[in-house]
Amino acid sequence: MSNNALYTDLSGYYDLMCADINYQAQSNSTHRLQQIFGNSGQRHLDLACGTGPHIYYLIKDGYQCSGLDINQPMLDLAKQRCPDAQFELGNMCDFEATKPYDLITCFLYSIHYSGDIQNLKNCIQSVHKALNNGGVFCFNSVDKNYIDNSLFAKHSVIHENSKLSFGSSWYYRGEGEKQTLKLSIEKKTTEETQRWTDEHSMVALSFDELKTLLIPYFDVHIFEHEHDKITAWDKASGNAIFLCVKR
């Protein structure tokens, strides 16, 4: 797992960095998928939960939520946001559940933080063991073969008399099982400009390769990366939602 120094040092800016993400839509979509494909249970675990925004909305849908993350400052913020949830410091590639869950999620492409194929296999096995029969594992992923190294997402917000600009991009060199998530933050005031950059090494694989890893444990459904409707993946886009039902 990465040591994510930028996330640790600037965890207070994390929600601003993700301000353009519709957490409610993602959470509502996951709830619908669990109702349709899952066992209707309400014990939920969010892997790489960050500051807990998905948990916040799933609690509103009646779930008993827990969160796991490797970053304690993130978990401290998550506990403030969701005092009724349980949070644990830990590695999603090596965790055990004292009581099984009905829904396990891993949003914002965080499944790639597994780092390499072996760690990803360990994560999948840990999730499978932690789920009740008929339980659902839901996450989003990017296919390495569709990554455009020239694309760069950026947005800005005004916060406490500062302009904060956040940037992110994927980079894949065209071979191997490693891809990079590049992040940048710029904080500009009338007096000064501060900048932080970070690169996170992440596991790279195609959707076919990912499905092969999942099939021994789950019935696998792949959907378009849309949250207002449920549409089968058209095999033409590089972002998708994986819905995995434990056998």
Image (cartoon, rainbow, N blue to C red):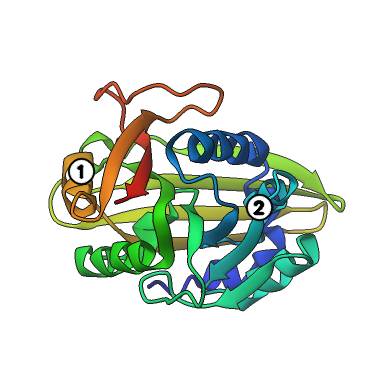
In this rendered view, identify the residue nearer to me: 230 or 78: 230
Q: Residue furthest right?
A: 161
Residue 167: x and y, percent?
A: 53, 46
* In this rendering, position of residue 95 left or right of residue 219: right
Q: Which residue is mark 2?
A: 63
- Quick one: SS at disc 1? loop
- At label 2, counting other C-alpha atoms closer than 10 Å, the crowd grade (few under 14, some 14-19, many 20 or more) is many
- At label 1, counting other C-alpha atoms closer than 10 Å, the crowd grade (few under 14, some 14-19, many 20 or more) is some
Q: Which residue is mark 1?
A: 206
The mark nearer the N terminus, 2 or 1, is 2
* In this rendering, position of residue 193 left or right of residue 208: right
Residue at the spot 67% in from the left edge and 52% down from the top edge = 53
Residue at the spot 43% in from the left edge and 37% down from the top edge = 37
Residue at the spot 57% in from the left edge and 74% down from the top edge = 71
Q: Quadrant of residue 208?
A: top left
Q: Nearer the viewer, mark 2 or mark 1?
A: 2
* In this rendering, position of residue 35 left or right of residue 143: right
Which amino acid is tagged 2?
Tyr
In this rendered view, identify the residue nearer to me: 98 or 27: 98
Residue 186: x and y, percent?
A: 63, 53
